[in-house]
Amino acid sequence: MTGKFSLCVLFFGGIALALLLALTLGALVVVGMQGAEAGALTSPDWRALVFTLEQAFLSAALSVLFAIPLARALARRRFWGRDTLTSLLGAPFLLPVIVAILGVIAVWGRSGWIADAMGWAGLGRLNVYGMPGILIAHVFFNLPLAARLILQGLADLPPERWRVAAQLGIEGRALFRLVEWPAIRASAPGAFALVFLVCATSFAVALALGGGPRATTLELAIYEAASYDFDLGRAAKLAGLQFAVCASAALIAFVVSAPVAASPGALTLVERWDGRSRASRIGDSAIILTVCLFLGAPMLAIFLRGVVGLDDLTGVVWAAAGRSLVVAALAILITLTLSLGLAALIVALHIRGARIVARLVDLAGLLPIAASPFVIGIAFIIVLRPVADPFALALLLTAIVNAAMATPFALRILIPAIRLAHDEHGRLADSLGLVGLTRLRVLYWPRVRQPLGFAAGLSGALAIGDLGVIALFSTPSEPTLPLLMHLLASSRQIDAAYGAALVLIALGFGVFWLFDRLGRP
Amino acid sequence: MKHLLTAAVLATAALFAGNAMAEDKPKLTVYTYESFVSEWGPAPAVEEAFEETCNCDLDFVAAGDGAALLGRIKLEGKRSDADVVLGLDANLVAKARESGLFAPHGQDLPENAVPGGWSDDTFIPYDWGYFAFVYDKTRMDTPPASFDDLLNAPDDVTIVIQDPRTSTPGLGLLLWVKHVYGDEAGDVWAKLAPRIVTVTKGWWEAYSAFLEGEAAMALSYTTSPAYHVIVEDDDTKAAATFTDGHYMQIEVAAKLVSTDTPDLADAFLAFMAGEEFQNIIPTTNWMYPAYPADDLPDAFGALAEPGKSLIFKPETTPEIREAALAEWLEALSK
Amino acid sequence: MIVVHNALIERGSFRLTADLTVPAGRICAIVGPSGSGKSTLLEAIAGFLPLASGHIRINGEDITVRPPSERPVTLLFQSNNLFPHLDVERNVGLGLKPSLSLTPADRRAIADVLDEVGLADLAARRPAELSGGQRQRAALARVLLRQQPALLLDEPFAALGPALRDEMLALIDALVLQRGIAVLMITHAPEEARRIAHLTALCMEGRIDGARSTDEVFANPGPELAAYLGIGS
């Protein structure tokens, strides 16, 4: 690397790092200064803390528990549509939370399919609100993610291992113990930690399915403190608490295994010779089918009701869709700027032997996972209020917060690609004297292009479905699409809400598909 | 990369285009709750009617259910774009006044706008109604006739209510129970807790959950069934009349101290108390008009009438609310 | 004895036809360019790929349709023949009992084969603590323990240095052939075939047409092999 180039990396990477630190730690400090007189934790605070930990732990445990047999079954079975299915496991991650919530209610709600079936079978009705609903929604979102990570672990095993086992006649429990379990044990803790983190900062799910004060997460409590009572002191106190919880969880996850976002495309899985017995075939089919039903039914419910609602859609929906696209486009731009700058900085530091600094910057890149979007939002309001109207900048601010939230995932996607480019052909590029833009174009671009497209798609899809911080900045006379879904339902336009949900799904996956596609050569 | 840049430029352009297109006319910004501003709520008709006379641009901004609306105004402080806030209720008036963000209306208004009368130098009522549990006649034959009835009803008589911290109906129910039971209110909530399917942030969530069949009853208004009769030609929804009496809601609006168009704000408040606005209210906001209006649609005549109307004096509510809220939180957190 | 008779193996659009016999106690090298189908044949014999037609027999038994674990064959890979979290003793012991409930007699048998391959002192080590050559010795010990009549080598020594490779070949010569095991070995190095293989089969463009004596093959290579080896014929 030439001096000029690395200066550039240091400069832009440094700016990206400063921005990210300002958005996370800075926001915490800004809000915290408002809450100097906050005082000790009250009993609602404690309850929120305990509930947050409890539901995050249970969500993570259930997700991983079901993900293990699912990943096992998917790894060893070959059937029509398996590759599609494994690719689709990444889909719930991109699904707007509000859409999934509507789907979960349509299936598990008091008058949903499951309740009808249970009522028909004389089992009484399930109340989805409270812990059950939160767990169902969290598992809906995170079981596929966990399964994907564990499946990745199984797929990463050298293919010879399965063959050696097949030759030696190692099957069933022995195979699980000797081959599968070590791989699962390596990937499951990371999956658990990631799911725990995602669920510990859960907002919309707890808001919509929590069913009242008994199911208040810290994130929800922060939102309540700020927007119900304008109690910035309590918001700051809770934000500190949440940050501590998530930062420790993130640290543990980082140590156990670096959390990875679901990687793109289908996994290449080797052919297997075990599990040919009838019982194991039935068992695998049952788990795959059950999970398909569990994940598919809410989607089907949304689709069936949404198709009816498509007729009810008006220009307002399309205008809202336009605003959501603006948020997505801005979020993509900011995410890529932040994450490229940081990723380049981390790799550059690593290459130059500053491993500890690189690791620290890497850790800083994970900070948003532990940060609260609402704290960032509140900090924006506090800081901007004297000079500008933060609410007029709602779309931009929503995009910035979403971009910050997507950065850790983008980093996980980009860093390996940049490192790979450097490791593979960095010396060749040095010896050829490739510098500046040529170096970017020849050395990095071919390697980074695809992950960049994937990261852009991911960030865009997440931003398009945001129903978190937009609730704080909301200008529902100019709503984004997820917010409009609230509005539609508020006017009892339930069908239109489901129709809008279909549009939102199409946009989210459309944006993801488009950028993922642009990234492919 | 070229594609990315193009997308970003387009996005930024679209973002600012919206602002540039605003006209030169003075703009009046009114913060209100979501259902008011929706296409199907009162806002479109109100906007059209007021803009005909004001030579201004009336802009409704939805900022959450009543109580959240106040939170929002406090969050924005003196920087707020809002000129008028529409959608607080009598129970929030004292708290709102305390914030110092609202300005006296300086208007001479009749004191008989709502049953029981109203006189306040800052907050003007624009409609009113009674809180009630709405049920579906096809799903329930005999609704509970009092809170005691509800407490002792079969287990499948479930309810969905709103959070008193965000929603004026939620706050209304909190005060209703407090009004009926006084010191025993906490115990009543504890007994009620198992049949509460969910506590929602806003009125719509609770009501749509009820319509979806998630609960046997939702906390709403005695006037809600009129919506189903008039819009959907459906007479299966009804409000359960409680012998305890029904807590009354008076929805109010006020001008903000920080408004940059005080005259326009005053004009709007005066318009709000006028016939044109009031005629729009019943069949869009599904509440009783506060000032003289044309005759109400027939469906309103068929609505349940509470035997007794309950309400705390606005200036006493903050204290009552705080105590009742603590009881409520304690009872429902378990 | 390994007999591959009129075998046709299809893998996507790739087709391999093979006819080959390796007598007991003999070693047969398969020589040919990359992608010509050498590994495909081994995988088919071990049961990892099905035959479209034809037969495979080991010591007269037709094993064409048996699952890998029921074939009296071991395929030794270039790497990853051992499970990383098991020590050498248990890795070898897997050859006896997949459940690893080893009796004292089992453990003595394991100690014996480990002694034979020169790993007697390293029984308690894990694969990560062994050198590449030691790992392949451990894998070889497992082959000896299983007492199967056929061994397939998919370049298991390619990653080793020349001296180690010679050592391993000598080990094969001394321990495997001595026991009457038939060995089929893929190699890229003609000198390896010349050094150890009694027979050599050519694998060219998806065809294996029997094995001839190694000396004869290299003395009279024919145009295809000559082109591959880069020598004039």
Image: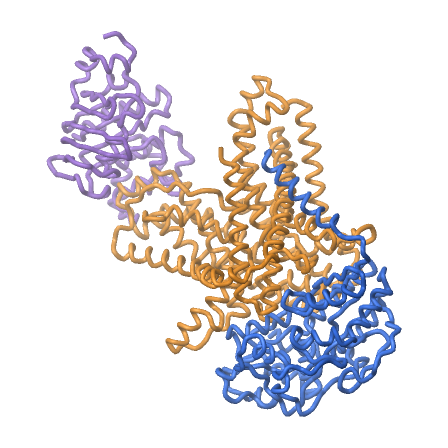
Chain colours: A orange, B blue, C purple
C106 to the left or right of A387: left
Name the residue rendered at 86%, 72% in the picture: B105
Question: Image quarter for residue B174?
Answer: bottom right
Quadrant hosting residue A488: bottom right
Q: Which residue lies furthest to the front in this view?
A: B52
Q: Position of residue C211 (x, y in %)?
A: 17, 22
Answer with left or right where residue A6 lies relative to residue A445.
right
Residue at the left extreme?
C60
When asked about the image quadrant of residue B163, the answer is: bottom right
Res A348 seen here: yes
Q: Is residue C3 visible?
A: no
Is B85 placed above or below B293 here? above
Percent position of residue B276, x then y: 74, 74
Q: Residue at left 36%, top 30%? A: C134
**Rendered residue at 38%/76% (across/down):** A120
Relative vertical location of residue A164 with respect to residue A485 in this rendering, above or below: above
Residue lying furthest right: B106
List x then y, in percent, for residue A327: 64, 49
The answer to which of A415 and A434 lies nearer the viewer is A434
Name the residue at 45% across, 75% down: A125
Q: Which quadrant would the N terminus of chain A be assigned to in this image?
A: top right
Which residue is more in the foreground, C203 or A448?
A448
Above or below for C182 versus C231? below
In depth, the one of B40 and A204 nearer the eye is B40
> Considering depth in this image, is A439 or A25 the residue closer to the camera?
A439
Locate residue C23, reporting x and y percent.
14, 27
Position of A228 with respect to A263 (left or right) is: right
Does residue C45 appear to the left or right of B88 in the view shown?
left
